[in-house]
Each structure stands twice: as C-alpha cells, then as structure tokens.
Amino acid sequence: MPDFNVTILLSGSFSNMVLACLLEPLRVVRDCTGAEICWKIATEADTEVSSSSGIKVSPDIRLADAGPADLVFLISGDEFREGDASTALRRYLSSLTRDCTIIAADTGAWKLAMLGHLDGRSATLHWQLLDEFAETFPKVRVLSDRFVKDGRFWTCGSASAALDLILNYIGDRFGQAAAFDAGAMFLHDNARRSCASGFDLTLASSAPHQLKRIIRVMSEALEQTMTIADIARAVNMSERSLHRLVVEKLQMPPGKYYLLMRLDRARQLVLFSDLSLNDIALRCGFAGASTLIRSFKAHRGVDLRSLRNRG
C-alpha cells in the first residue's frame, strides 16, 4: 500500500487550475523524494464531470469504495448551489472528519458548510462569494484570508491560494526541503542546463519585487556564498525586514532557503553533469564532497551519491 493516499473529489465545473495547483506539488514531492504518493479521483455521483473549461474527467473509483485517505481534496466549481449534497458525499466525508485533513478549494467550503462540518469553525472560499457564504451559513466564522486552517478542515479560494496552502501542507508533512522543491516548480523559472554557469532562477511575476531581488542575489552567489547581512545590504534592506519577508512568502528563514538553493543546484549537477562530487561541492559553496554529502543527507534525507548511481 502507498505511504500516502489522496482522494480527489471533483464536482461539476471544477477549476483545472485549482486541481493542478493542489496536485502537481504532490507529484513533485513523489518524484523528488521517492515517497509513495497515490491519488484517485472520485465524483459525487460516480459519473463523469466536466471542468469549467469543458475538460471531461471520469472517476477512478466509486465514492463508496474510496476508503480511508491521508488527504482529501474537495474541489467544487460553479454548481455548488445546485441542490443538497448527495447522501454518498455526506456519508463519505462524515467518516473522514476524525481521520484525515480535508482541503476544500474554490467553492468546496460551501459543500462542507452544507453538511454542517464547518459549524463553529473558521473558513474561507473564493473571494467573490464571501458575503453570500457568510449570510447563508451564519454558524461559520467566515474569514477573508487567502487560506484558513481549522483542525482537519483547510479551506481556500483561488488557484494561487490553493498553491500556497498545499505548499504549507507539504512543509508540515514532508519537510521544508520537499516544499522548496515543489514550490520551485511553480514559483521559479529554473532552467535545468547541465552546463549552466549560474542558477538562472527568476521568481514568478506575481512575487514581490524585493523578494525577487533577494532570490536573484542568492542565486548569483551559490559558489562564493554570502552572509544574510551581506544579502540584506545588497538589496538595501535591514536583516530584520529581509527575514520577515522571506519567512512570510517562502515559509522558512532566508538562511535555510539559501542553503536549499545550493543543495538543489548540487542535485541538478549530480543528475545532469559529469562533474565529480568534489567539484560540485565547490561550485555550490561547500568545502568539499563530504561536507556536501552530509548536508544533503541532513536536509533531504537522501545520500547524494545514490542519485548519481540511480541516473
């Protein structure tokens, strides 16, 4: 049996973007760490559903046969007002409320509220529906936050908020190194070139300008590493402001993020170059191969040498 099971519950007119932002980071964690992560799709009526853009998706399993999961995505679209939640959905979600985390995205919180799971809890959903949601479900503490975590019920609205939320979950469940890898696939444009002289990393256009500058300075100093004080001076910020910004946006201290960038660069060179481990270590700011191997093992739980052997 896989180490980690995910059930994806889709309703009609669900957002492809929301689904991708929740699922793809887990796929990256699976591919980068070797964790046995498995997901299956179910629908409320056990029938094919269409996304908001018309892409048709058939369920992998009947909802009644879905069984226990470690994580459930409840992704609802424009049809959230149509009728009551099905008996099958009511029964399935009720059996999970004590045993797993449920991430309700887009209008998924509406479904949870219809079933009474959010009574007395805090929640959010797509920003355009916040006022209507609050009026319809007065027992729910409706917040305008990007995402809300209340016990096992985690809620969010837009696709970007869904991405933030799943990265937060990955950091808690699989560690910050895994969250770094997953986030890099979405937040960065990282050209994987075996002969690249630099990290060639650019944050997505939606990221704050100051954060882009910080990451750019870090990415250009992977070999001759800088102190955080040096980085702060380079971007005309105080260390305290830099630390606060990085922790807020990247969910880890700047020193750790900088180290993970160097380790990620080392991983890329191991996989896509013929450089010796000692040369790779020096290119990534480590004193030598043994130091790099120890750091990689400590932060990623993998022997770096095994990646080259695997390749």
Image (spheres, rainbow, N blue to C red):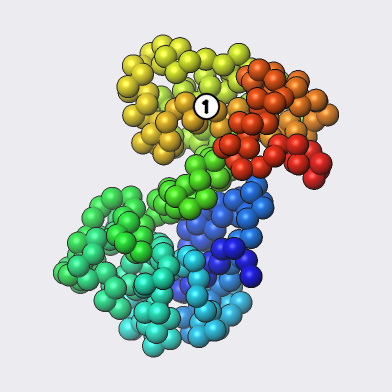
Q: Residue at x 23, y 55 (%)?
A: 143
Which of 304 and 203 lies nearest the eye of the viewer?
304
Which quadrant does the N terminus fall into? bottom right
Which of 284 and 238 lies nearest the eye of the viewer?
284
Is 28 placed left or right of 103 in the picture?
Answer: right
Q: Say whether residue 92 is visible.
A: yes
Residue under label 1: 258
Q: Say whether residue 89 is visible.
A: no
User: Which residue reaches farthest bottom?
Assistant: 87
Q: Residue at x 51, y 46 (%)?
A: 175
> Residue 310, image x and y in percent?
80, 45
Q: Residue at x 22, y 71 (%)?
A: 119
> Residue 174, image x and y in percent?
52, 50
Q: Is residue 162 above or below residue 3?
A: above
> Residue 24, image x and y in percent?
57, 54
Q: Is residue 264 above or below residue 26?
A: above
Q: Crowdedness of circle 1 by 10 Å Cα count: few (<14), some, many (20+)?
A: many
- Give SS at disc 1: helix
For badge 1, the amino acid type reads: Tyr
> Residue 257, image x and y in percent?
50, 31
Is 311 placed left or right of 83 in the picture?
Answer: right
Q: Residue at x 56, y 63 (%)?
A: 4
